[in-house]
Image (spheres, helix red, strand yellow):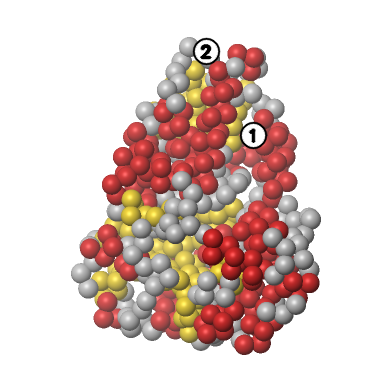
Amino acid sequence: MPATARVVVVGAGIAGLAAAHRLTSCGADVDIVVLEGAPRIGGKLLVGEVAGVAVDTGAEVLLNRRPEAVALAQAAGLGGDVCHPAATSAAIWSRGGVRPMPPTVMGIPADLAALRRSGIVTPLAVDRAGSDADVQDGRAPQDDVSVADFVLRRLGVEILDRLVEPILGGVYAGHASRLSLYAAAPQIAALASRGGSLVAAARATLATSAATPVFAGIRGGVGRLPAAVASTSGSDVRVGAPVRELSRGDRFRLVVGPTRSQQVVTADAVVLATPAAPTARLLRDVCPVAAQELGGIEYASMAVVTLAVPVSALPPVSGSGFLVPAVTGRSVKGVTYSWRKWAWLAEGCDDVAVLRASIGRHREERVLQRDDTTLVDLARSDLAATIGLRGPALDSTVTRWGGALPQYQVGHLERVARIRSAVARVPRLEVCGAAYDGIGIAACVADGQRAADRLLAALRSRDTMAP
Ligand SMILES: Cc1cc2nc3c(=O)[nH]c(=O)nc-3n(C[C@H](O)[C@H](O)[C@H](O)COP(=O)(O)OP(=O)(O)OC[C@H]3O[C@@H](n4cnc5c(N)ncnc54)[C@H](O)[C@@H]3O)c2cc1C
């Protein structure tokens, strides 16, 4: 490794910060600069405020069943603040009511009797799901297909529209008809690979799943994580530093900053932890094949409307919230009862209920082109129609997430393999983040850490130092 190699990480979302944190925590002699284009770090993690109460207005929950995100929170000094949701049971707005979600694996029902009782789908649809069609087809398809193609054939349209699609809408803000079975719903593909009935495979999977809580949060909001990671990463984190160009000679050369006051930063190694479109722009000259592939990854935009309402304006509700299937025609695609889900949040809310409503699906940006007041009204009217919310909000905030969530469309895994193999041919260059192998925080942390590990290995190997 050269004496004090300089690594530049572009993008201070959670993937970039996890990469920076890993680079220093390995004890390597590296000087790390993180360049963030926005005026703040964190990307899709952000704590906002409504009615004087701190609340996540971006991502709000960590997957606890895989270790990376919670372990990073602990390493960043937030271990004492890691908590678990106080309310976990979810529901679906369907057929005129908010109905408790029966046990499922990514929407594939594990218990047809519970599904029948829930009333989410018609009795006919439950019979269809229990028919031979679920078994006849046997194993998982060899080639990638859309989630819709696969589920429709096996379990019928209602299971697809009222269970699987709302879950994909919640995670990806995407549509089952475009999302890849293997990339976006690997849990369903895993059920298929067991052979036989999907329902039986879902039942078997849930029966053997660990008793540990699926999700975790952080007191005060998951949005606290980026600052904690940045401050313990020992790196020089610069905000308001958009990287405009990347080129490569003996070293990497990055053109940084607003057009009127550009600077040049040089580096021995670079990690691009930016979404697909800016990564494609930066790779145009350095790795054109990857740039072209990245240009094909579409994103969904969305908005989070956070409302504070008097508890008395709500009828009694249970669970952590509900999802809304696209076929119902409502604008809101999911609602979180934040004050019920997070005990730390409830502590700050005397007689105030804080709810989050998500609006916006892939290729349906028109609904987001309305002003904030209209979006708040939309959320309120959907909440009135679904759970009977009465009267105006005490306070509200609208957080717009343009280019929020990458869409893992059919063929995504092959696309990512082509990107990774093209990038691997450029020594000391790495890419990581939500565009590739998982959009959740834990997956992004893992991807950032893997990028850092590969880079450290490359820096340690003198052979790779030749440009
Ligand atoms: C509303 C919402 C709710 C979500 N909820 C959850 C949840 O509860 N749990 C969960 O696990 N996941 C959730 N997700 C998904 C998850 O938060 C994201 O996929 C993940 O945080 C993405 O991290 P990232 O570092 O890859 O990218 P980002 O967070 O997008 O960070 C990329 C960073 O790069 C910067 N950047 C871009 N271009 C440049 C440039 N040219 N120069 C310098 N900087 C640049 C951006 O400003 C940004 O800060 C949610 C996402 C959204 C939008």
- Above or below 6: residue 146: below
Question: What residue did someone put label 2 on?
Answer: 2
- Above or below 264: residue 358: below
Provide residue 179's location: percent of width, then percent of height: 66, 60
Residue at the extreme top of the image, as rendered: 3
Residue depicted at 53% across the width and 15% down the height: 1
The quadrant in which residue 418 appears is top right
Front residue of 412 and 37: 412
The quadrant in which residue 309 appears is bottom left
Question: What residue did someone put label 1 on?
Answer: 283
Provide residue 339's location: percent of width, then percent of height: 31, 67
**Can residue 314 be seen at all in this image of the molecule?**
yes
Front residue of 200 and 427: 200
Q: Quadrant of the C terminus?
A: top right
The amino acid marked with disc number 2 is Pro
Q: Residues within 10 Å of mark 1 (few under 14, many from 20)?
A: many
Q: Earlier in the sequence, mark 1 or mark 2?
A: 2
Please state if 13 lies on the left or on the right of 75 as rendered: right
Q: Secondary structure at mark 2?
A: loop
User: Nearer the viewer's eye, disc 1 or disc 2?
Assistant: 2
Residue at the extreme left of the image, as rendered: 350
Provide residue 87's location: percent of width, then percent of height: 36, 68
- Above or below 9: residue 45: below
Provide residue 319's location: percent of width, then percent of height: 39, 73
Q: CA distance from mark 1 to mark 2?
A: 25 Å
**Can residue 260 be seen at all in this image of the molecule?**
no
